Amino acid sequence: MLMKQKLKNYILHLSFLLLLGNVLFAQAPNKMSYQAVIRNSSNLVVSNHAVGMRISILQGSATGTSVYTEIQKTTTNANGLIAIEIGTGTIVSDSFSNIDWSNGPYFVKTETDPNGGTNYTLTGISQLLSVPYALYSMNSENSVNSKKSDTANIALNGVPSGSQHGQTLMNCNGDIVWVLNGQCPAKIASFNCTDTTHSGVITSNFSSINCISSVSYAGGNGGVYASQIIPSSGVTGLTATLAAGTLNTGNGVLILNISGIPNMAGTASFLLQIGNKTCVIQRSVIIASITNFNCADTLHSGSLYANFSANQQSTLSYSGGNSANYPTQTIASTGVLGMTATLASGALNSGNGTLSLNITGTPTSAGIASFTIFMGNKTCTLQRTVLTTPPTPTWPIGTVFCNSTATAIVNVTNPLTGKTWMDRNLGASQAATSSADPAAYGDSYQWGRKADGHQCRNSGTTSSLSSTDQPNNANFILSPNSPFDWHSIQNDKLWQGVNGVNNPCPMGYRIPTIAELEVERNSWTQNNSSGALNSPLKFPLPGGRSNTNGALGAVGSNGSYWSSTVAGSNAWYLLILNSLVDNISNLNRARGLSVRCIRDY
């Protein structure tokens, strides 16, 4: 404690210091250390000066009854410091050794004469918030009260078995308790166990990640609590970890992190204890389940051919997902043999979602290949048609070639993705030799249109929207107004798969999905134009045409490649930027972008 008062050009600064945890004698001394610093009115220390003091111990309050009084005389040192031991001065009244420290609170009253006499003009009072255990222990041994009373006091105040020296008696938010290291132990009035909130989903036999339980409490005393690692009961294999911390004074929340791998589905319980209050936290451990598979709506990409290596996808939708994790499934084909459908491990959505299966292997014959997938107690049998032989790659009837020559159909396979593509853009006369290779730019298609001549980079323009899927002209249709589509009635199915109404690719090829473009992009060594050019597909930067005036722009600085995937009234595309990070985005369908065809098998 530090006090400051002015009297006759003196200012007294008092600091009260208890010797905590340093009493190691068989019989504890009846004294406590006390220090004070004296400064003058200029805030300079008063060095080597006599000081007279009267010290009283008050019980109950700052104006309570004195249970002990003594006087002392001392001299400041060169730093203005005085150091005395309360209990060793000239006794004025009562006995220091008879103070019952368990019957507090107690206050120290100091009266000081800075001139060294008994004209005490400076007064300070401060509460004793802690008392050395050695004093309390000795007081209990010598108390005039019965041993029964002492035992009750000790038990009430939580003295551990063995009467360990180094403890102090502290006022912890109104409770007088024994503590070590001057820290009040955590204590609460109650847990609000039924209001515990949980985040994250705990799934049987899966590692629990980002699973949190938050339990609130009332009546916290501001005390310190140790960390707790609580093993689960019921469903085993989990632990709830409470990091060490300090309670609020009043209401607060404790955060527990749930980790581990539960051994089964059911209820995992964790017993949390703060002081003498407990709370059993319960977490549900689930397995992946759904309400229903929408088997009839399964979407398939790519075609399967007998004796040709397969690398295609099937996407299955479901309803009523419970957010649980599910394991990898590898499903062998029946009917037509030689293939497997692989569902990578993941987590269900809460509600509706989709599952993507990768079909690989080499079908042994033509016919129907079946794959049965399980999720909880629901099943779905996917069926894929296996055709006899791939079609001869010919161009769709009516295809307009802008330079009077059909685009050469040359295949290139990315060994990292296993997908086979045309090695050049539609309309290009060669595969790219540089990012700004004009011979590799090719045509600029409006999304969903066939190769009717509009895709030529110098085609004419018209402001008349088409009311049909196949306009009766070869103009680039301008659309400056929402929804910015060349078609007056939007149709999402124009470029879907090899049988898309306006698929501009040769037979056996199609416009890629955005997922397929993303897989290719992720295989590049760099996520920019250099990575695009150095990939097996050698994407250049052809720029694109504006939907408002048909002008070419960003030629040689970016490349934009359509996917077959719609995004509301827009469509997804791959954007390649010169020296900048590439990305997947969506754009209005009246824009003119490049097309790269992927083989359908």
Image (cartoon, helix red, strand yellow):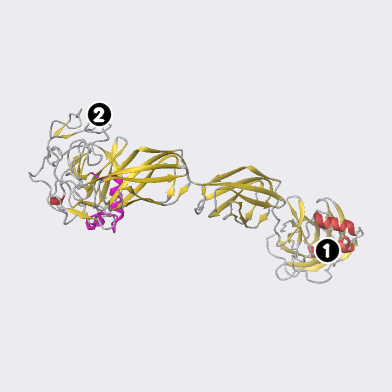
- Please state which of residues 105 and 46 is positioned toward the viewer in this rendering: 105
Q: Amino acid at mark 1?
A: Ser
Give the residues in magenta. Answer: 511-535
- Name the element at disc 2: loop
Q: How many marks?
A: 2
Q: For residue 137, which numbered disc appears in the image? A: 1
Circle 1/circle 2 CB separation < 8 Å: no
| Residue 532 % position (x, y) | 24, 54
Main SS class of the magenta portion in the image: helix
Mark 1 → mark 2, Cα distance in angstroms? 92 Å
Magenta-span inclusion, residue 338: no
| Residue 310 % position (x, y) | 27, 51
The residue carrying pointer 2 sits among few (fewer than 14), some (14 to 19) or many (20 or more) residues within 10 Å by Cα, namely few
- First in sequence, mark 1 or 2: give its number: 1
The residue carrying pointer 1 sits among few (fewer than 14), some (14 to 19) or many (20 or more) residues within 10 Å by Cα, namely many
| Residue 270 % position (x, y) | 62, 51
- Please state which of residues 264 and 418 is positioned toward the viewer in this rendering: 264
Quadrant of the rendering where the N terminus is positioned: bottom right
Residue for point 13% across, 32% down: 473
- Please state which of residues 228 and 397 is positioned toward the viewer in this rendering: 397
Q: Examine the image and state in which quarter residue 115 appears.
A: bottom right
Taking the image as shown, residue 169 lies to the left or right of residue 305, namely: right
Q: Amino acid at mark 2?
A: Ile
- Name the element at disc 1: helix
Q: Examine the image and state in which quarter residue 30 appears.
A: bottom right
Q: Which residue is mark 2?
A: 489
Q: Disc 1 vs disc 2: which is toward the camera?
A: 2
